[in-house]
Amino acid sequence: MTAADVHDAGPEVSRRLLESSATLSYDPASEIDWNAPLPDGAYGLNPEWSTLYGTPLWDEMSERQRVALTRHEVCSIMSTGIWFEMILQQMILRDQYVKDPANPEFQFALTEIADECRHSIMFARTCEKLGVPAYFPRRHVVELARLFKSTASAEVAYGGTLVAEEVLDVMQRDWMRGENVLDIVRTSSKIHVVEESRHMKFARHEIREHMAGVSPTRRYTSGALIAVVAYFIVNSLVNEGVYHAVGLDTRRAVAEVAANEHRKSMMRNACAGLMEFLGESGLLPRPAVALYQRVHMI
């Protein structure tokens, strides 16, 4: 497909996404039963997605601790999701600033921002319902993100967005089907998966459009920058504070997570489609591959 073909397809892609949004969207305020009690034995996420699953420490934990840990882990992931969705909204607004409001791309971009606002509120209410405090990335990551959200544009902005959305999408597709997972998490995951599928299509199209006909140097630089963003996002998903919160030795827990081959395999499988797309787009230079390997995305 030529650069002109990619550009010409833009309005049609956005128009289809707008039609999908009009026919299949959810209101978390009414779709989720916020007053329903939380069953004592239900997990926050599928045990297989726990960072400690498959480790000696997991085997030593009581069932109560395992349930509590998964609830703190899912809320840590949701808190990180809120943090990045706020970054995403600012980048999209900058990208669409003074663009033609009659263009379907402009209209879908604002639709995506509205979706992200609802998702963030949904995640916030879920964590509140579970009684889990907010978990935030480390201070240096928060400050670096201030720079990123204020300067990132084009394929780097949409690439960072796609990384966050794709990783969470694979996890939540399992959570929404988990029979031993809390209903509130299953329903919020379903809502997010359905609506984020449109966001990912939009991000992929924007990346293709921005990358059409660019120089090898730009591909190399953009690919490396997207990998840096991915590195910090993945490292921020589960805050180390979750282990202390459920009475575990944090130092031991962190060490076992770092050596957890099951966890590494789950991450590689979750990122397979994303890595394939980045490779096809010419956004996997050697420095990027090295960073993805460090966080087990490849």
Image (cartoon, rainbow, N blue to C red):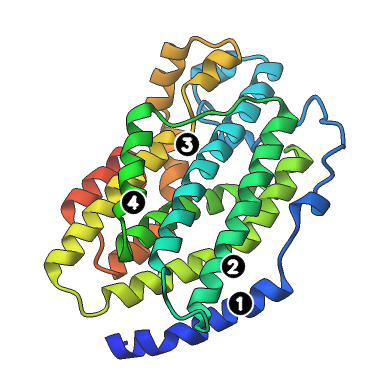
Q: Is residue 25 visible?
A: yes
In this view of the protein, can residue 173 be seen by the observer? no
In the rendered image of this protein, does residue 177 appear above or below residue 23?
A: above
Q: Residues within 10 Å of mark 1 (few under 14, many from 20)?
A: many
The reply to whether callout 3 and callout 1 are in contact (CB within 8 Å) is no
The vertical placement of 153 against 210, above or below, is above
N-terminal of the two: label 1 or label 2? 1
Q: Which residue is mark 3?
A: 237
**Quarter holding residue 222:** bottom left
* Circle 1 residue: 18
On residue 150, the disc is 4
User: Label 2 near label 1: C-beta < 8 Å?
Assistant: yes
User: What's under tag 3, amino acid-wise?
Assistant: Leu
CA gap, disc 2 and disc 4: 21 Å
Task: State which tag comes first along the sequence, 2 or 3.
Answer: 2
Question: What residue is at 53 percent from the left and 28 percent from the top?
Answer: 135
